[in-house]
Image (cartoon, rainbow, N blue to C red):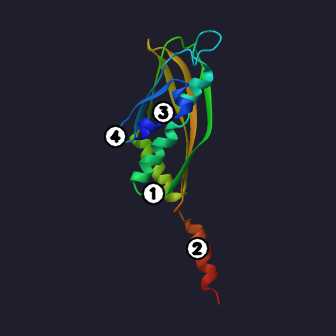
């Protein structure tokens, strides 16, 4: 359902950003950006804003789904994003966004010990010929809403234990 919601989401639909597939474990999503009259710039290549938009929400969605399925009450958002354009995109583009098992272990450990996880992930944007046209970086922020710091608990306990 999420795949179709994003396919029909107007900013993606009109920019020709097509979510091909969320993998069943929510560790990967495959995206295609089709070059069309709706997203071409004055040079005839795909507009940079379209390329950046195609990289924007997916790490957030993946982490959100992963931790909700593990029973966490989290808030997840993109803390910052950047993109570096390498070559003009004159063909359709492919983007694979993947969360590695080690990243999940690292995030879960941080959520349990400090209550939040912040990490920057790199994304390669590749054209039909396998040429990297752009590289993006997304800094993801995940907060465990149920986390209670042991320091906060100790302070609260000390206050309530005093006469």
Q: Position of residue 123 (x, y in %)?
A: 51, 29
In front: label 1 or label 4: 4
Q: Residue at image x 43%, y 53%?
A: 68
* Residue 155 vs residue 143, the one in the foreground: 143
Residue 4, picture quadrant:
top left
Q: CA distance from mark 3 to mark 2?
A: 49 Å
Q: Are marks 3 and 1 in contact (CB under 8 Å)?
A: no
- The residue lying furthest to the bottom in this view is 163
| Label at residue 8 | 3
Q: CA distance from mark 2 to mark 1?
A: 23 Å
Q: Are marks 1 and 4 in contact (CB under 8 Å)?
A: no
Q: Residue at image x 60%, y 85%?
A: 161
Residue 17 sits above or below residue 114 on the image = above
In front: label 2 or label 4: 4
* Residue 58 vs residue 117, the one in the foreground: 58
Circle 2 SS class: helix
Q: Position of residue 54 (x, y in %)?
A: 53, 29
Q: Position of residue 113 (x, y in %)?
A: 51, 58
* Residue 135 vs residue 30, the one in the foreground: 30
| Label at residue 24 | 4
Residue 17 sits above or below residue 72 on the image = above
The residue pinned by badge 2 equals 154
Q: Specify few, some or many for label 3: CA neighbours under 10 Å numbering under 14, 14-19, or 20 or more.
A: some
Q: How many badges with numbers are in the image?
A: 4
Q: Residue at image x 58%, y 73%?
A: 154
């Amino acid at each position: 359902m999420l795949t179709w919601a994003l396919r029909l989401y107007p900013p993606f639909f009109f920019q020709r950003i097509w979510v091909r597939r969320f993998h069943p474990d929510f560790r990967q999503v495959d995206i295609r950006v089709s070059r069309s009259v709706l997203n071409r710039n004055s040079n005839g290549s795909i507009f940079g804003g379209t390329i950046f938009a195609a990289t924007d929400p997916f790490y957030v969605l993946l982490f959100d789904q992963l931790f909700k399925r593990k029973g966490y009450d989290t808030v997840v958002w993109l803390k910052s994003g950047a993109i570096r354009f390498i070559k003009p995109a004159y063909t359709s583009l492919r983007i694979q966004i993947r969360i590695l098992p080690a990243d999940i272990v690292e995030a879960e450990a941080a959520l349990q010990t400090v209550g939040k996880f912040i990490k920057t992930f790199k994304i390669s944007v590749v054209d039909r010929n396998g040429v990297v046209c752009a590289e993006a970086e997304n800094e993801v922020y995940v907060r465990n809403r149920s986390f209670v710091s042991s320091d906060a608990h100790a302070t609260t306990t000390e206050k309530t234990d005093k006469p």
